[in-house]
Image (spheres, grey):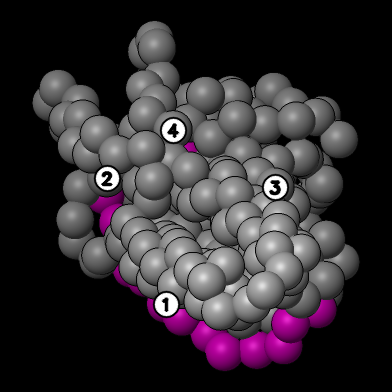
């Protein structure tokens, strides 16, 4: 597919959070000013500022977007698509697309993790599909099929189909997918974003070499989780 193209924008705060953070900061400043100048005591002002500024900085942490590049050859490697923790490494029957056994690796993202999602492999996007559904806790097995989710099928340069599934959780109610059918995609590029706690599943051929373990922390676009045969 030629030389890998690096398109990652040099941003520190993800664009999904720019409006929310700006509007909330202005609202906090405005209400804070009213409390400071409108009351005879400063106690309500300080209580308000401590509570809401703390909440704002938690949101700021949630929307941070580190600039990352994977160092090394990506040939046949599968890289973690998200920050979080490995919660599933098992063989499953995948009957929606493959209709055979697949190796599924799942990464759970807590509200404290970076929630940008990266492409786990180089290749070409075959299709993108969105499904409405429930909002079970993201770490439950049934969340993979029953929760709202977006499926991205990627065909690698060697012709291997890899399915990536963005899954909404009990708190996450918005899945953003940047992938578009027929576009080439590369490790280091953003695939999407999921707000609040959620999960990403990767479905791989059954003979894939596993390079991760249960409960292992992952860093998106950095941690090698598998190698294709």
Residue found 27% across the figure and 45% down from its top: 185
Measured Cα–Cα span from mark 4 to mark 2: 19 Å
Rate crowding at label 3 as few (under 14), some (14 to 19) or many (20 or more) other CA atoms within 10 Å. some
Left or right of 26, for residue 131? right
Query: If you read the primary sequence from the N terminus, does the residue marked by circle 1 or circle 4 appear first?
Result: 4
**Label 4, residues with CA under 10 Å away: few <14, some 14-19, many ≥20:** some
The residue wearing badge 4 is: 66
- Where does label 2 land, which residue? 185
Say above or below: 106 vs 5: below
**Which sits earlier in the primary sequence, circle 3 or circle 4?**
4
What residue is drawn where x is 80% and y is 29%?
Answer: 216
Q: Viewer-nearest of labels 2 and 3?
A: 3
Residue toward you, 14 or 90: 14
Q: Which contiguous range is marked in magenta?
A: 117-136
Question: Disc 4 or 2, which lies upstream in sequence?
Answer: 4
129 over 19 or under it: above or below: below
Q: Which residue is pictured at 37% across the width and 63% down the height? A: 22
Q: CA distance from mark 2 to mark 3?
A: 27 Å
Q: Which residue is mark 3?
A: 112
Q: Nearer the viewer, residue 91 or 109?
A: 109
- Residue 129's tag is 1
Q: Position of residue 190 (x, y in %)?
A: 35, 47
Q: Are marks 4 and 2 in contact (CB under 8 Å)?
A: no
Say if the magenta span includes residue 121. yes
Task: Return the x and y of residue 105 as percentages of the image width and height.
Answer: 70, 45
Of tags 4 and 2, the one toward the viewer is 4
């Amino acid at each position: 597919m030629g030389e890998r193209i690096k398109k990652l924008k040099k941003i520190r705060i993800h664009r999904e959070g720019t409006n929310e953070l700006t509007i909330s900061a202005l609202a906090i400043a405005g209400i804070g000013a009213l409390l400071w100048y409108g009351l005879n005591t400063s106690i309500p002002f300080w209580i308000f500022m401590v509570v809401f500024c703390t909440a704002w900085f938690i949101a700021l942490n949630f929307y941070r977007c580190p600039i990352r590049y994977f160092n090394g050859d990506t040939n046949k490697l599968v890289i973690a698509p998200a920050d979080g923790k490995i919660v599933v490494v098992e063989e499953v029957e995948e009957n929606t697309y493959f209709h055979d056994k697949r190796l599924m690796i799942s990464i759970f993202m807590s509200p404290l993790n970076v929630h940008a999602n990266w492409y786990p492999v180089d290749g070409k996007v075959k299709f993108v599909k969105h499904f409405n559904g429930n909002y079970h806790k993201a770490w439950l097995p049934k969340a993979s099929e029953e929760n709202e989710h977006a499926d991205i099928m990627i065909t690698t340069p060697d012709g291997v189909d890899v399915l990536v599934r963005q899954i909404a959780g009990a708190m996450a109610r918005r899945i953003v997918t940047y992938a578009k059918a027929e576009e080439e995609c590369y490790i280091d590029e953003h695939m999407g974003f999921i707000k609040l706690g959620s999960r990403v599943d990767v479905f791989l051929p059954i003979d894939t070499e596993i390079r991760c373990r249960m409960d292992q922390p992952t860093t998106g676009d950095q941690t090698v989780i598998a190698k294709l045969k």
